[in-house]
Amino acid sequence: MGIGASVIQGIKIGKWVTIGAGAVIIKDVPDFAVVVGNPGRIIKVNNNE
């Protein structure tokens, strides 16, 4: 989780998620996702292999 990132109460963050600096997470995030921006958006979902 990057510096200054925020997660709204009640939001679920999956396993091995990367959250960029300053991101604001307002929706649940699936496993292995990379999330950036305000509002947070998924830019990539890594393969778990």
Image: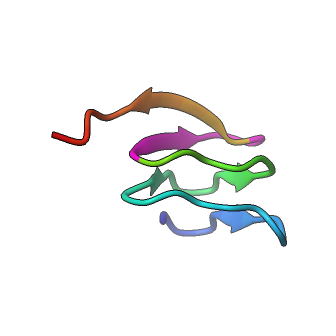
For residue 38, what is the image quadrant? top right
Q: Residue at x 61, y 47 (%)?
A: 29
Against 17, is 40 above or below? above
Question: For the magenta stretch, what is the residue range?
Answer: 32-39
Residue found farthest to the front:
49
User: In this picture, is 16 found above or below 48?
Assistant: below
Front position in the image: 3 or 18: 18
**Label tally:** 0
Q: Would residue 11 be found to the left or right of residue 3 on screen?
A: right
Q: Residue at x 76, y 62 (%)?
A: 11
5 sits to left or right of 11: left
Up/down of 44 relative to 30, above or below: above
- Residue at (59%, 60%) from the top-left corner? 13
Q: What kind of colouring is applied to the model shown?
A: rainbow
- x and y percentages locating residue 23 in the rendered image: 64, 52
**Whole-percent x and y of residue 22?**
63, 56
For residue 9, what is the image quadrant?
bottom right
Picture quadrant of residue 37: top right
The x and y percentages for residue 45 are: 41, 32
Is 43 in front, or is 47? Answer: 47
In this rendering, position of residue 37 left or right of residue 19: right
Q: What residue occupies the far left of the structure in this picture?
A: 49
Image quarter in which the C terminus is found? top left
Where is residue 47 shown, x and y percent of the image? Answer: 26, 33
Q: Is residue 1 magenta?
A: no
